[in-house]
Image (spheres, helix red, strand yellow):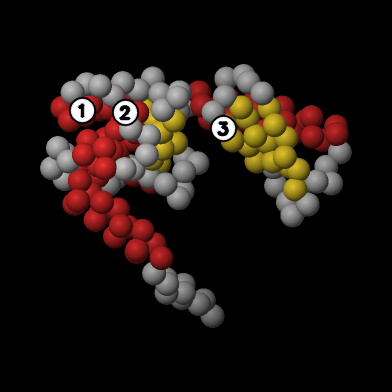
Amino acid sequence: MTGPVEVRRSARRRRTVSAYRDGDRTIVMLPARMSTAEEQRWVTVMLEKLAAQESRRMPGDDELAARAERLSEQYLDARAVPDTVRWVTNQNSRWGSCTPAEGSIRLSHRLQGMPEYVIDYVLLHELAHLLVPGHGPRFWKLLESYPRTERARGFLEGVVAADRLPHAPAPRED
């Protein structure tokens, strides 16, 4: 994937360099003190790294797309037709996301291993966004036909709540 590259420098960033895709553009984040030559080298390294990650995409993207098609047929009269459906590892505060203008749906890798009905709900939720962008009454009306909506939402709320609980400190080794 080639597209525009945006370099963002940060005075708070000391040593780390990171990169991610944002639509068709690539964002590379660097320490502010880095020289132009280092910047060019790191942009090349990070573009290669992203390309390698994308070439070994998370297993199951094809299965996820087929699942989306089945859910759209069953619950949305086959009206929601995404161009891409894939697992991503860069979503840690959302379960899924949809860009209606691009027809793209992304599900967080954190859903993997959760009950099937939960994954189906999140996928159906994102499919519904292809038809209705916001979360108004028309949007929720689309999800009424999925029988496990409330159960799946409750499961996800429980996961979020459990993540917020204080964790016991690890035992000390003396």
Dot 1 and dot 2 residues touching (CB under 8 Å): yes
The amino acid type of the residue labelled 3 equals Asp
Identify the residue shown where x is 20% and y is 28%.
76
The residue that mark 1 highlights is 76
Instruction: Name the quadrant of the N terminus.
Output: top right
Q: Marks 1 and 2: which is nearer the front?
A: 2
Seen from the viewer's position, the closer of residues 18 and 124 is: 124
Residue 159, quarter of the rendered image: bottom left
Q: Secondary structure at mark 2?
A: helix
Spatial CA span between label 1 and label 2: 9 Å
Residue 27 vertical position relative to residue 114 in the rendered view, above or below: above
Dot 3 and dot 2 residues touching (CB under 8 Å): no
The amino acid type of the residue labelled 1 equals Leu
10 Å neighbourhood of mark 2: few (<14), some, or many (≥20)?
Answer: some
Say which label, 3 or 1, has the lower sequence index.
3
Q: Position of residue 101 (x, y in %)?
A: 45, 24
Identify the residue shown where x is 68% and y is 36%.
28
Q: Secondary structure at mark 3?
A: strand
- Using residue 75 as the reference point, say whether residue 114 is left or right of it: right
Q: Secondary structure at mark 1?
A: helix
The residue that mark 2 highlights is 131
Q: Position of residue 126 (x, y in %)?
A: 33, 35
Spatial CA span between label 3 and label 2: 22 Å
Q: Marks 3 and 2: which is nearer the front?
A: 2
Say which label, 3 or 2, has the lower sequence index.
3
The residue that mark 3 highlights is 22
Say which label, 1 or 2, has the lower sequence index.
1
Identify the residue shown where x is 56% and y is 32%.
22
- Using residue 122 as the reference point, say whether residue 28 is left or right of it: right
Spatial CA span between label 3 and label 1: 28 Å
